C-alpha cells in the first residue's frame, strides 16, 4: 500500500518494488475481481477496492506522463469535412480519425449553460476529429422558456418521458434507439454524462485498441456492488437482479462507457416508449449490463485501459472510484493522464480549456475538493463558515454578450433607482431581534425610496401580535401575510415539501410567489432578509451599495460544493432535481437578493413538478441558465453568516463591528434566558 491514511508514503526498497511492478500490474484485474464493490462507495470492501485502484494507477505511473491535450496535432487540427453534428458524413469526413464515433450525452433539461460549455470545449474538438454527438433529455414537463438560448441549435433530442434520475435507464435506452436509427456508419456508441470531461487527444490514442464488435467497455465494477442508500436504494421489486450474495452483476461505471454498434443495437432493441414509469430497472449502468448479459452469446463488461507503454494513460478518473481514499491520494492518481475525468463542473470545463495543461488544471480541483473533505471529515461540515471552502469564483462565469447587453439596457432604463428595489423582512413572530429589525425597516421606509415590506406568517402570529407589528412598522411599510396552506395549494407536493426546507415553513415559497406576481412587477430586484439576520448599521447602506449591480442572485454565502461533498447528506441536496455529481453548488439564503426574472424562473421550475431545497435551487438554477448571473456579496460585509450555531446578544456586543452582517442572532428566550 503506497499511502498511509494520513497520506504519507510507506518506506520500502524501491528496487524490489520496481522489479515486481510488471507482475503486480498484470495481477491487478484479478485482485479487483476478488473485491466486492458497493454501488455507492463505502464500507471496508469498497475502501479496499479503492486502494487497489490507487495501486493500479501507481503502477501505470512507471512510464512518463504525456501532456494532456496541450494542443491537437497539426494533422488532426487541419482535417476538414462536414459538421460533426451531422449524422452521415461525406467522403472527406470519413477520413477523420474519429469518424464513426457517436457521443450520446445524457443531459439535464435545464442545464443549458452546461451544454453551451460542452459545445465550445470538448465537443468542438471531437467534432473537428470527425465524431458526431447529440444531447438527450426527457421531453415531458419542460418549461419552454428555459430553452430560448438553444433556439438556433438542433443537437438536443427530446425523448418521451419526464426527466428524473429514476428515468436514466429510459434515457440511455432511448439514446441508443435513436442512434441506431439515425446515425449512419456508427462504429462506437459512447454513453457519456454531462459532468464528464473527456480528452479528445487521449480518446484518439485509445480508439485503435477497441474491438469494433461485441464491445461493452469502460471501468468495470467486478464481483458485484451491493445496493446502496439514498438515490442508490434498490426497491424490493428489483432485487431479483442480485445474486445469492445479494450483489449486482459486473457492470461498467455509468459516467462513460463505450458500446460497439452491435451492442448498442441490442440495447436499442430493449427500448420501448410504452414502458410505464417504474417498469425498468432504475440504474442505467447496471441495466445495460443486464441487457447485454442476456445476449446470445453474452456481451460482458470489459475493462478499457490503454497499453501500459510510455504514456501511462488510463481510462477514467472518477471521484466514485477514490472517494474513500486518504485526503491527498488524488495527487498520486494524477501522475497519470486519463481519457476522461468525473465529475467536472461547467466552470471547471470552461476554464480547463483555457489552460495549456488541462490535465493539471482538472486534477487540481479534484484533488482540492477530495483532500479537504477527507481531511475535515466530521459533523461540522453541515454548513461552511463564510471564509472557508466557499470558492465563489467557481460559481461565476464570464458574462456573455447577450447578458452584457441586458445589463446595459437595464442601466439605460434607470434600474438603479431605489424605487425599483424591494426590501422584505420575513418573520414568524415578534422578539427583541425581529423588533429591532422592524424599527430599522420603519426608519428605512421614511428615509429612502426603497420599497420596504414585511412578509409575516399569519399562521403563527395572532391578531394581537399582528396589531403590534402594524404599530411598529408604521404606515410606510407594507405588511404581506403568508399562510402555509395557501403556498401548499400553489405548488405540487414534492416541490413544496423539498423547497420549503427542513421545517416546511411557507417563507421561501411565499417569497417566490410574491416576487413573481403582478404585485411585484415594478421591482427589478428584491432583498429577502430573515428576522434573525442583523446588520450593524443602516440596512439602506448595504442595499444602496448594490443598486448598480444587476446580478440576478446575490447572497453572503456561496459554496462551490454542497455540504457533505459529494456523497454525504443526500437528503439535503440530492432531492434537488438540479443536483448531480458536478452540479451541487450551495448558498445559504437567510439573506439574499433575487431578480424578478429569476423568481419567475424558480416559480415555473417548481410548478413543473421539480423541487429541491431552496439553498440549492436558487444558485443551481441560475448557474444552468446562461442569461442568469450570480455574485457573492463581498465577504468584507460579513462578520458571521452560518446556519448554526446561533449567537446571542451578548456575543454580538462582544464581536461588534460596524456595517457587518451577522446570522443567526437569537433572542434570550431561545437560550432559556430571562430578560
Image (cartoon, helix red, strand yellow):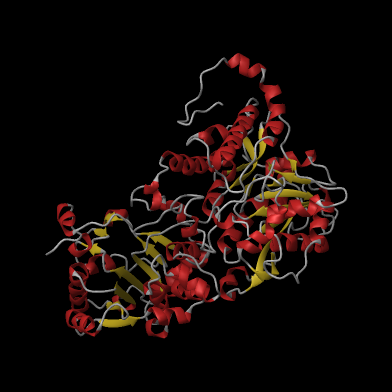
Q: Quadrant of residue 317?
A: top right
Work out whether 396 lies above or below 110: above
Q: Quadrant of residue 466?
A: bottom left
Q: Quadrant of residue 415?
A: bottom left
Looking at the picture, tell me which residue is in the foreground, 390 or 549: 390
Looking at the picture, tell me which residue is in the foreground, 608 or 312: 608
Q: Give the residue at the far right of this rendering.
A: 296
Looking at the picture, tell me which residue is in the foreground, 309 or 509: 509
Q: Give the residue at the far left of this rendering.
A: 675
Say if residue 92 shows up in the picture: no
Q: Is residue 416 left or right of residue 673?
A: right
Work out whether 12 lies above or below 672: above
In percent of width and height, residue 45 lies at: 59, 38
Say if residue 180 shows up in the picture: yes
The quarter of the image holding the C terminus is bottom left
Q: Is residue 467 left or right of residue 564?
A: left
In percent of width and height, residue 414 lies at: 35, 76
Amino acid at each position: 500500500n503506497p499511502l498511509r491514511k494520513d497520506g504519507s508514503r510507506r518506506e520500502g526498497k524501491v528496487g524490489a518494488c520496481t522489479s515486481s511492478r510488471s507482475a503486480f500490474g498484470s495481477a491487478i484485474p484479478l485482485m479487483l475481481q476478488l473485491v466486492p464493490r458497493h454501488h455507492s462507495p463505502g464500507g471496508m470492501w469498497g475502501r479496499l477496492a479503492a486502494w487497489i485502484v490507487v495501486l493500479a494507477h501507481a503502477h501505470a505511473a512507471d512510464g512518463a506522463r504525456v501532456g494532456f491535450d496541450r494542443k491537437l496535432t497539426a494533422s488532426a487540427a487541419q482535417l476538414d469535412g462536414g459538421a460533426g453534428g451531422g449524422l452521415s458524413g461525406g467522403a472527406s469526413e470519413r477520413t477523420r480519425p474519429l469518424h464513426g464515433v457517436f457521443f450520446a450525452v445524457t443531459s439535464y433539461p435545464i442545464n443549458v449553460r452546461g451544454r453551451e460549455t460542452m459545445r465550445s470545449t470538448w465537443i468542438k474538438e471531437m467534432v473537428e476529429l470527425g465524431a458526431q454527438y447529440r444531447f438527450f433529455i426527457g421531453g415531458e414537463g419542460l418549461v419552454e422558456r428555459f430553452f430560448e438560448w438553444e433556439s438556433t441549435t438542433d443537437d438536443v433530442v427530446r425523448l418521451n418521458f419526464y426527466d428524473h434520475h429514476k428515468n436514466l435507464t429510459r434515457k440511455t435506452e432511448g439514446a441508443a434507439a435513436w442512434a441506431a436509427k439515425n446515425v449512419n456508419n456508427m462504429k462506437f456508441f459512447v454513453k457519456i454524462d454531462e459532468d464528464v470531461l473527456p480528452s479528445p487527444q487521449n480518446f484518439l490514442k485509445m480508439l485503435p485498441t477497441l474491438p469494433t464488435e461485441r464491445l461493452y467497455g469502460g471501468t468495470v465494477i467486478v464481483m458485484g456492488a451491493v445496493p446502496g442508500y439514498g438515490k442508490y436504494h434498490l426497491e424490493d421489486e428489483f432485487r431479483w437482479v442480485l445474486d445469492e450474495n445479494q450483489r449486482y452483476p459486473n457492470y461498467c461505471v455509468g459516467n462513460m462507457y463505450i458500446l460497439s454498434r452491435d451492442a448498442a443495437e441490442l440495447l436499442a432493441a430493449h427500448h420501448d416508449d410504452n414502458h410505464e414509469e417504474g417498469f425498468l430497472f432504475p440504474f442505467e449502468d447496471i441495466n445495460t449490463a443486464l441487457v447485454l448479459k442476456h445476449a446470445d452469446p453474452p456481451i460482458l463488461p470489459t475493462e478499457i485501459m490503454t497499453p501500459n507503454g510510455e504514456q501511462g494513460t488510463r481510462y477514467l478518473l472518477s471521484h466514485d472510484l477514490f472517494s474513500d481514499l486518504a485526503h491527498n491520494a488524488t495527487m498520486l492518481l494524477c501522475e497519470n493522464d486519463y481519457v476522461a475525468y468525473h465529475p467536472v463542473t461547467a466552470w471547471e470545463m470552461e476554464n480547463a480549456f483555457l489552460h495549456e495543461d488541462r490535465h493539471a488544471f482538472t486534477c487540481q480541483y479534484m484533488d482540492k475538493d477530495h483532500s479537504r473533505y477527507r481531511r475535515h471529515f466530521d459533523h461540522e461540515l453541515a454548513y461552511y463558515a463564510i471564509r472557508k471552502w466557499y470558492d465563489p469564483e467557481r460559481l461565476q462565469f464570464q458574462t456573455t454578450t447577450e447578458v452584457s447587453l441586458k445589463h446595459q439596457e437595464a442601466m439605460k432604463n434607470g434600474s438603479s433607482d431605489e424605487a425599483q428595489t424591494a426590501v422584505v423582512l420575513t418573520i414568524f413572530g415578534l422578539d427583541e431581534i425581529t423588533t429591532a429589525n422592524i424599527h430599522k425597516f420603519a426608519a428605512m421606509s421614511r428615509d429612502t425610496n426603497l420599497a420596504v415590506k414585511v412578509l409575516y406568517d399569519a399562521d403563527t402570529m395572532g391578531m394581537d401580535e399582528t396589531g403590534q407589528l402594524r404599530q411598529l412598522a408604521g404606515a410606510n411599510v407594507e405588511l404581506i401575510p403568508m399562510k402555509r396552506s395557501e403556498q401548499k395549494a400553489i405548488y405540487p407536493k414534492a416541490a413544496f415539501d423539498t423547497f420549503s426546507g427542513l421545517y416546511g415553513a411557507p417563507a421561501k415559497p411565499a417569497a417566490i410567489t410574491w416576487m413573481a406576481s403582478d404585485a411585484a412587477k415594478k421591482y427589478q430586484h428584491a432583498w429577502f432578509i430573515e428576522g434573525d439576520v442583523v446588520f450593524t448599521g443602516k440596512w439602506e447602506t448595504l442595499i444602496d451599495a448594490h443598486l448598480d449591480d444587476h446580478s440576478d442572485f446575490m447572497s453572503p454565502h456561496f459554496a462551490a460544493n454542497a455540504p457533505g461533498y459529494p456523497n454525504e447528506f443526500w437528503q439535503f441536496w440530492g432531492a434537488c432535481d438540479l443536483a448531480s455529481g458536478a452540479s451541487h453548488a450551495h448558498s445559504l439564503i437567510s439573506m439574499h437578493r433575487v431578480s424578478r426574472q429569476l423568481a419567475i424562473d424558480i416559480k415555473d421550475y417548481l410548478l413543473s413538478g421539480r423541487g429541491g431545497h431552496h439553498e440549492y435551487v436558487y444558485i443551481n438554477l441560475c448557474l444552468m441558465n446562461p442569461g442568469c448571473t450570480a455574485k457573492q456579496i463581498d465577504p468584507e460585509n460579513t462578520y458571521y453568516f452560518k446556519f448554526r450555531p446561533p449567537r446571542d446578544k451578548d456575543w454580538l456586543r462582544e464581536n461588534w463591528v460596524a456595517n457587518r452582517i451577522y446570522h443567526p442572532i437569537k433572542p434570550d428566550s431561545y437560550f432559556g434566558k430571562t430578560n
